[in-house]
Amino acid sequence: MSFAREANRAIRSTLVLWVIGAIIYPLAIVAFGQIVMPFQANGSLIKNAQGQVVGSALIGQPFTSDKYFNSRPSTSSYSTADPKKDDAGVLQTGVSGASNLAPSNIALLERIRGKDDPDPKKRVEGDLTRLKTAGVQPTADLVYTSGSSLDPHITPEAAKAQIARVAKARRIQPNDLETLITQNTDGRFLGIFGEPGVNVLKLNLALDALKSTS
């Protein structure tokens, strides 16, 4: 068998495999995702009552108002870009990402506590004081960030600890909020993996849909 014939066969095989692996397979996966699970394939985006995209079910975002259930602290707030030096417009894209800085990196401590704060514990202590002042019994997930700092969930206990504050701010019956939390609690994956969690964004959107008793 000649070298030219072998080379020709190798080139044809490479082209066929390239078409299958680089074009047909990716397009088939995209089509499968859009047909079978379009919500997940498009980023699990959540819309408000007006049909506007307000976030993703997979990424947490900050809520600090007394009228809303607060989320757990985040070290990213969707992006680590500097608002004063955002020439690339990173903050306008809603890009998420943690810092990936090691615990020994001084920049991590500065980002957590603020460059002018000499005490790395002050951020936690400040959150504890704020929660107690608001009448909220602090839980671990209301004080500490998750491993990725992007977790959209808090524990049902953390949500229930905020009922009195939210009920007072919105003049809503506490029992209505307890029901709302139950309705927006995600169970264990397949019934056995992980722990129940409350998606804060979904809960607060459901909260906005409630009619105030005032």
Image (spheres, rainbow, N blue to C red):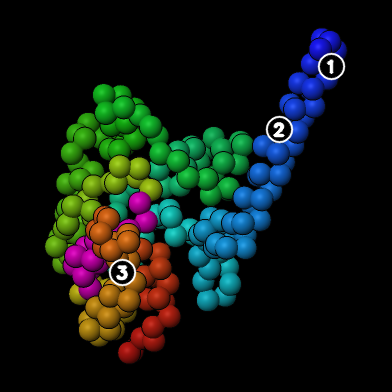
Q: Is residue 92 left or right of residue 195?
A: right
Mark 2 lies on residue: 17
Work out whether mark 3 precedes mark 2 in sequence or the reverse, and give the earlier one. 2
Q: Nearer the viewer, mark 1 or mark 3?
A: 1
Which secondary structure, mark 1? helix
Between the residue at mark 1 and the residue at mark 2, the CA separation in whole angstroms equals: 18 Å
Amino acid type of disc 2? Leu
**Dot 3, how many residues are within 10 Å of its Cα: few (below 14), some (14-19), or many (20+)?**
many
x and y percentages locating residue 204 in the rendered image:
38, 70
Q: Nearer the viewer, mark 1 or mark 2?
A: 1
Q: Which residues lie in the magenta part?
A: 151-163
Quadrant (top left, top right, bottom left, bottom right) of the C terminus: bottom left
Mark 1 lies on residue: 5
State whether residue 1 is above or below residue 128.
Answer: above
Depth check: give the residue in front, 97 or 135.
97
**Residues tagged 3 and 2 counted as in contact (Cβ below 8 A):** no
Between the residue at mark 3 and the residue at mark 2, the CA separation in whole angstroms equals: 46 Å
Mark 3 lies on residue: 185
x and y percentages locating residue 124 in the rendered image:
20, 45
**Residues tagged 1 and 3 counted as in contact (Cβ below 8 A):** no
State whether residue 64 is above or below residue 210.
Answer: above
Name of the residue lying farthest toward the top: 3
